[in-house]
Amino acid sequence: MHKSSTCNFMYGDLTDKKTIEKIRQNFDSYESNFYEVLLYTKNRTPIWLYMQVAPIRNENDKVVLFLCTFRDITLFKQPIEDESTRGWTKFARLTRALTNNRNLVQQLAPLSKTEVSHKPSRLAEALQLGSDILPQYKQEAPKTPPHIILHYCTFKTTWDWIILILTFYTAIMVPYNVSFRAKQNNLAWLVLDSVVDVIFLIDIVLNFHTTFVGPAGEVISDAKLIRMNYLKTWFVIDLLSCLPYDIINAFENVDEGLSSLFSSLKVIRLLRLGRVARKLDHYLEYGAAVLVLLVCVFGLAAHWLACIWYSIGDYEVIDETTNTIKTDSWLYQLALSIGTPYRYNASGTGQWEGGPNKDTLYISSLYFTMTSLTTIGFGNIAPTTDGEKIFSVAMMMVGCKYSQ
């Protein structure tokens, strides 16, 4: 782009190479500047041009193109001595320059005193060194039907950030609710999760009316193409993500197996993180953003692994076939160490009761996964069963890969 922008096809014997090199450097530095350069026309006639370079920036303050304006100032320069005028007197060369620039001569016609005192010369205005006369350019938004939303408009950008925050909320709460089987009996949490489901449902409707970028980089605003593209990509995942699983699990008469199935289906919502990764890709060029993103990813991975670690312990602590407790499970050892042991209710439900509360269980699980991922491992919480050891090995491998 830079080579063609310096008009190399107009170079000649009298073209100053230093000036051309300055113009090239100006393109590399994305700065606004001006130059006086001698170039050649199609019939190889040398002319002096006043060249003004102005970078055009989009709404993201990125240079998308350069505006180069050229004005013939041959009349104001020393008459050029080329092959056709070699041997001519200076007066003859000046006469030829004036003849070839009649339009410019008319601009130099004497002005009346009134015009001089009230209105500056247009030529002087055009040749002034300041950049305030440059027109302001802005990318024109493509015309879309009334019911179609541009994917980069202010409303859609704000809405995407809301969906991004709610997706992170879902990525935290879904694994916790599935692993700890937290019934949404709390009305406040139930209302909050229902509001999240409604917002995800509205997002589906908006996606059917939002433009997207086509394969060739063009903005697609045709309603039919938008619907077909969304149905082929994220529609199924978004639809499964907004189903009200929490409301279904809130009913006490729901079968336990069916409730577990609905809780497991909520994990599908985590697939929305793929859309989050695509949006955050624009911020990877900033060092601070990369650091914050890495910390968030590490914390999220530790949270997920903590939920899995608890699920393994909860599954193995009680042998359902013999209705006995495994004393080598990390949950049993934790219950003994904090003074809340498991006890068998023989006179009542006939099941094992007691043990640590859910807050203690989650904090202990997160503590173990954090120490394992960072390869510290104090040993106060340790895997004992085969399932716990296999998971711990896999978690250490993830931690080693993350620390590289």
Image (cartoon, helix red, strand yellow):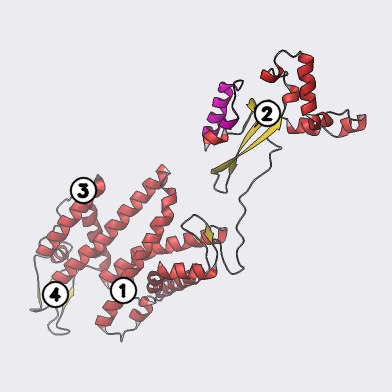
Q: Position of residue 152 (x, y in %)?
A: 53, 57
> Can you see residue 291?
yes
Answer with the quarter of the image where residue 121 lies.
top right
| Element carrying mark 2 | strand
Q: Residue at horizontal 40%, vertical 42%?
A: 287
Mark 4 near mark 1, Cβ–Cβ under 8 Å?
A: no
Q: Type of residue at label 3? A: Cys
Q: Is residue 203 magenta?
A: no
Q: Is residue 150 left or right of residue 73?
A: left
- Residue 265: assigned label: 1
Q: Label 3 crowding class (10 Å Cα cut-off): few <14, some 14-19, many 20+?
A: few
- Kindly report the distance in space between the C-alpha atoms of the residues bearing marks 2 and 3: 63 Å
Q: Type of residue at label 4? A: Arg
Q: Residue at horizontal 22%, vertical 56%?
A: 369
- For marks 2 and 1, the one nearer the N-term is 2
- Residue 343: assigned label: 4
The region drawn magenta spans 7-29
Q: Nearer the viewer, residue 6 or 294?
A: 6
Q: Type of residue at label 1? A: Leu
> Can you see residue 36?
no
Q: Residue at horizontal 33%, vertical 79%?
A: 249
Mark 2 near mark 1, Cβ–Cβ under 8 Å?
A: no
The residue beneath circle 2 is 49
- For marks 4 and 2, the one nearer the N-term is 2
